[in-house]
Image (tube, rainbow, N blue to C red):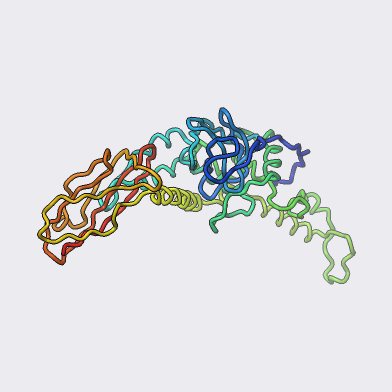
C-alpha cells in the first residue's frame, strides 16, 4: 500500500468558517441564535453553514442556527452532507434523507409498546450512516472514543486532508457500500487514500517522515555483527527496514474503526439524547394506593419540567391487567385513566408511553398501583 508519506505536499492553510460569536451555554448564542450539538459528546472541528450562520464546531460539537434552517457539514474542503435539518442534537442518522424520513416509524418492544430504538438500530446499518460515522471516528486525534470522549478533528488533520483531496482517484462517496468505502490494497478507497495522507502525530515525529524507499533500503550497508562496530550517523539496512515498517504501520485506515465500534458509538450517543428527552417529563405520582372497594376511574397526568406537555402520541399498558385495568388515554390532555379490579394486597404497574410533539423519540414512564 502506498504510504501516507510517499509524496510530499506543500501544505497550504485552507480557510475555514470563523466563529463570529461566543456560545452562552444556555441553548442560545451571543447573536441570539439557538445552539445545537453535533452528537451529545461532541464532534469538534467540523465546519457548518446555514442560511444565516457559519462556524466550526467547538469541543462540545456546538453550532448555531435559527429554527427552520438546515446545515451543510464539511471537514475542511470535503463536504460531508448538505440540507441536514438544524436542531438541538444532530447525529449521523439525521445526515441521510432516506434515513431521516424513516425515524418516526416506531417498532414494538417485548413489552408491546412502541419505541424508536429498534428503528434507530436498524437505520444505523445504512451504508451512508455507517460510512460517515466510521470516517469521522477515524479522524479523531486520539484514535478512539471508547472512553466516552468527543471526536476531536484538529486543524493539523484538516490541513493534511485538504492537501490530499486533489490527489484522490475519485471523490469520497458515503453512499457506496461499506465494503467499497473501506477497501484497502490495490483498489484503495478514496476515504483510505485520504487517511493514508494524514499523520496523527506531531509534525516532528519520526512517524510523520517519508518512509525509506525499497531502493534506499537495498543500497544501505548491512549492520555489523558487533554493535560496537557501528559507525555514528550511519543508517544500516535493518534500521531502515524497521523505520519503514514503523511508519507504514502508523497509517490509519477506515477498518481500524470497526462496524461494531461505530454501532456502539451511535448507540451511546442516541441513548444520551433519549435520556435527555425523558428527563424533561414525569408523571404526577410515582406510586398510587387505592382501597380494594374503590371502583372509581383514576387519572395519571404526564407533566413536563418548565412547561406544559405537548404530545404527538400516547399509549398505556397495565403490567397486571387482572388487578389494574387501563380505561383510556388521551394525547390532547396528556392523561391516562385506569381502574382497579383486584383484591387487597395485590398490585400492578401502569406503563405510560408517549411521543412528544416534534420528536420521533418515545418516552416511557411508569407508576406503581397498590391495592389496599
Where residue 191 sits: x, y (%)? 60, 41
Q: Quadrant of the C terminus?
A: bottom left
Residue 186's quadrant in the figure?
top right
Q: Is residue 343 above or below residue 12?
A: below
Farthest-out residue, top:
51
The foreground one among 151 and 132 is 151
Residue 290's quadrant in the figure?
bottom left
- Residue visible at 56% across and 46% down? 25
The foreground one among 371 and 229 is 371
Residue 33's quadrant in the figure?
top right
Where residue 364 sits: x, y (%)? 32, 50
- Residue visible at 58% across and 49% down? 151
- Residue visible at 36% across and 38% down? 357
**Label total for image:** 0
Q: Is residue 197 left or right of residue 90?
A: right
Residue 59 at least partly seen: yes
- Residue visible at 29% across and 46% down? 114
Where residue 94 sits: x, y (%)? 47, 38
Where residue 289 sits: x, y (%)? 20, 61
Q: Is residue 297 left or right of residue 43?
A: left
Residue 190 at least partly seen: no
Q: Is residue 63 above or below residue 82?
A: below
Q: Is residue 73 above or below residue 266?
A: above
Q: Is residue 93 left or right of residue 55?
A: left
Amino acid at each position: 500500500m502506498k504510504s501516507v508519506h510517499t509524496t510530499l505536499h506543500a501544505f497550504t492553510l485552507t480557510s475555514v468558517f470563523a466563529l463570529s460569536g461566543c456560545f452562552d451555554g444556555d441553548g442560545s448564542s451571543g447573536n441570539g441564535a439557538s445552539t445545537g450539538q453535533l452528537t451529545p459528546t461532541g464532534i469538534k472541528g467540523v465546519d457548518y453553514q446555514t442560511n444565516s450562520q457559519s462556524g466550526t464546531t467547538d469541543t462540545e460539537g456546538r453550532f448555531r442556527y435559527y429554527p427552520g434552517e438546515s446545515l451543510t457539514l464539511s471537514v475542511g474542503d470535503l463536504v460531508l452532507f448538505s440540507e441536514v435539518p438544524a436542531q438541538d442534537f444532530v447525529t449521523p442518522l439525521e445526515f441521510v434523507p432516506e434515513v431521516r424520513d424513516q425515524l418516526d416509524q416506531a417498532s414494538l418492544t417485548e413489552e408491546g409498546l412502541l419505541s424508536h430504538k429498534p428503528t434507530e438500530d436498524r437505520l444505523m446499518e445504512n451504508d451512508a450512516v455507517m460510512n460517515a460515522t466510521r470516517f469521522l471516528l477515524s479522524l479523531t486525534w486520539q484514535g478512539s472514543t471508547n472512553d466516552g470522549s468527543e471526536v476531536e478533528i484538529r486543524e493539523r488533520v484538516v490541513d493534511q486532508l485538504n492537501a490530499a483531496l486533489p490527489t484522490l482517484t475519485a471523490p469520497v462517496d458515503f453512499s457506496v457500500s461499506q465494503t467499497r468505502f473501506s477497501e484497502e490494497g490495490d483498489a484503495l478507497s478514496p476515504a483510505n487514500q485520504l487517511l493514508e495522507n494524514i499523520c496523527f502525530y506531531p509534525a516532528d515525529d519520526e512517524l510523520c517522515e517519508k518512509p525509506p524507499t525499497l531502493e534506499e533500503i537495498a543500497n544501505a550497508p548491512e549492520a555489523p555483527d558487533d554493535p560496537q562496530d557501528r559507525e555514528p550517523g550511519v543508517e544500516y539496512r535493518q534500521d531502515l527496514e524497521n523505520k519503514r515498517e514503523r511508519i507504514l504501520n502508523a497509517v490509519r485506515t477506515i477498518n481500524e474503526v470497526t462496524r461494531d465500534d461505530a454501532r456502539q458509538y451511535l448507540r451511546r450517543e442516541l441513548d444520551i439524547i433519549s435520556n435527555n428527552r425523558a428527563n424533561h417529563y414525569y408523571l404526577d405520582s410515582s406510586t398510587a394506593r387505592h382501597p380494594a372497594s374503590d371502583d372509581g376511574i383514576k387519572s395519571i397526568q404526564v407533566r413536563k419540567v418548565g412547561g406544559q406537555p405537548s404530545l404527538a402520541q400516547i399509549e398505556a399498558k397495565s403490567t397486571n391487567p387482572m388487578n389494574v385495568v387501563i380505561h383510556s388515554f388521551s394525547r390532547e390532555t396528556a392523561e391516562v385513566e385506569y381502574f382497579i379490579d383486584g383484591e387487597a394486597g395485590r398490585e400492578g404497574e401502569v406503563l405510560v408511553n408517549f411521543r412528544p410533539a416534534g420528536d420521533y423519540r418515545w418516552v416511557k414512564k411508569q407508576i406503581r398501583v397498590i391495592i389496599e
